[in-house]
């Protein structure tokens, strides 16, 4: 047996078509969404991600504005750029690419929550906790959307999330335990005594630890869905959290690259379009 591929790249392409239609509807109402990115320094991976986001925007008719700041920029310098983007009417949404090496809480808190495409502003995370509609963090919601598009059931499913980081594991647990998803979630981390005992029970395993090959075939229940979110690098190439032989046991598996990464970009685009729809009072599609 070999697992069905959860093809994030293909879903990104489909979602771009869907979003292009919504951007066209906004254009009829005289609104062009604009995404701004703030990049601090010249880390190659971060530079690639930011470049990909601008290319994605261009493909669906969203304008984008790049603010690249030198390595070693001060917190005050970054906050001044955030203030400027909060004010600019042509910027409907923006993000500060992490990591900046600066106080992320201070930066995230300064962003106008209605322009927060990352869904990581404390107000928006608080809204998630309190069950109020708000932009959702892109990577975790991308995991959920990918499973939904392949009809992998979450209602009543046992999900094990490996990692409790701010960008993936922690918000994913919050999203999956909403009534609308209705999964039973176990969060694992470095304090977990027997990781394999948990993952073996799971219908869905989400590996977001950033530890290459931490999920091996013996840790996966036959037929389970496995999402490989972790990104580490080995010889310049992406090394995911999931060992390649897991494909022989799992029912569904994301490639990495080509799985959750493109879904992160898809959900970012969706958040940009949604922010513009909200600001313009244009109804999103049902
Ligand atoms: N593909 C994509 O689109 C994206 C991928 N990523 C990747 O996802 C991963 C998670 O990112 P993020 O949410 O920021 O989390 P962090 O990188 O901040 O934290 C990693 C988490 O994994 C846990 N962990 C580390 N080692 C182990 C272990 N041996 N066993 C169990 N748990 C372990 C840590 O536990 P503890 O808390 O105990 O230290 C921590 O909670 C990273 O590799 C990141 O690069 C992130 C964003 C987007
Ligand atoms: N404020 C902020 N928002 C983010 O959304 C954010 C961030 N900071 N910091 C870092 C993480 C990481 N991230 C990815 C985006 C795209 C891919 C992606 O598209 N990857 C491709 C190819 C990657 C390659 O080949 O190098 C793939 O998986 O197929 C991956 C990871 C967004 N992040």
Image (spheres, rainbow, N blue to C red):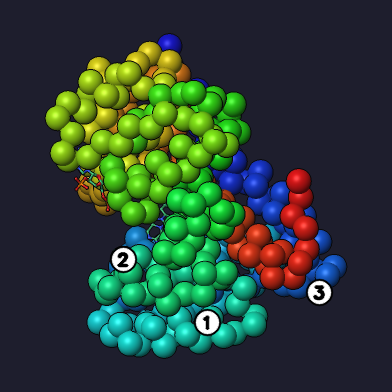
User: Along the polypeptide, which appears first: circle 2 or circle 3?
Assistant: 3
- The residues bearing labels 1 and 3 have C-alpha atoms spaced at a distance of 21 Å
Residue of label 3: 30
Q: In front here: 97 or 184?
A: 184
Q: Tell which of 92 and 73 is nearer to you.
A: 92
Q: Is residue 190 left or right of residue 33?
A: left
Please report the residue visible at 27 percent of the width from the left and 24 percent of the height from the top: 198
Tally the marks: 3
Q: On the picture, is 24 further left or further right than 129?
A: right
At 51% from the left and 31% from the top, the residue drawn is 182
Whole-Å distance between the Cαs marked 2 and 1?
19 Å
Tell me where residue 70 appears, x and y as whole percent.
32, 83
Q: Quadrant of the N terminus?
A: top left
Q: Give the residue number, with chain letter if any, for mark 1.
A: 85
Residue drawn at the location 47% of the way across and 43% of the way down: 175
Measure the alpha-carbon separation of dots 2 and 3: 35 Å
Mark 2 highlights which residue?
99
The 10 Å Cα crowd at callout 1, few under 14, some 14 to 19, many 20 or more, is many
Instruction: Locate ligand 2 by image quadrant.
Output: bottom left
> Residue 90, relative to residue 140: is it above or below?
below
| Residue at disc 2, CB closer than 8 Å to ligand 2 | yes
For the residue labelled by badge 3, is the local secondary structure a helix, a strand or a loop?
loop
């Amino acid at each position: 047996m070999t697992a069905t591929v959860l093809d994030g790249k293909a879903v990104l392409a489909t979602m771009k078509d869907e979003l292009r239609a919504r951007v066209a509807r906004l254009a009829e109402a005289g609104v062009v969404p604009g995404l701004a990115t703030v990049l601090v320094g010249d880390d190659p991976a971060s530079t690639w991600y930011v470049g990909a986001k601008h290319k994605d925007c261009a493909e669906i008719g969203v304008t984008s504005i790049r603010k690249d700041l030198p390595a070693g920029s001060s917190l005050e310098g970054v906050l001044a750029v955030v203030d400027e983007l909060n004010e600019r009417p042509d910027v409907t949404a923006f993000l500060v690419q992490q990591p900046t090496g600066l106080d992320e809480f201070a930066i995230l808190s300064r962003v106008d929550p209605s322009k927060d495409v990352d869904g990581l502003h404390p107000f928006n995370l608080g809204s998630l906790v309190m069950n109020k509609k708000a932009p959702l963090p892109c990577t975790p919601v991308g995991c959920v959307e990918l499973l939904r598009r392949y009809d992998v059931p979450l209602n009543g499913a046992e999900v094990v999330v490996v990692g409790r980081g701010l960008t993936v594991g922690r918000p994913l647990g919050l999203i999956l335990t909403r009534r609308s998803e209705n999964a039973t979630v176990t969060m694992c981390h470095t304090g977990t005594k027997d990781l394999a005992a948990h993952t073996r029970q799971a219908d869905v395993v989400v590996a977001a630890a950033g530890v290459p090959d931490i999920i091996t075939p013996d840790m996966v229940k036959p037929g389970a869905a496995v999402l490989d979110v972790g990104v580490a690098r080995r010889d310049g190439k992406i090394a995911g959290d999931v060992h390649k032989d897991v494909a022989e046991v799992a029912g569904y598996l994301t490639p990495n690259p080509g799985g959750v990464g493109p879904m992160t970009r898809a959900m970012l685009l969706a958040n940009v379009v949604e922010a513009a729809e909200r600001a313009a009072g244009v109804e999103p599609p049902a």
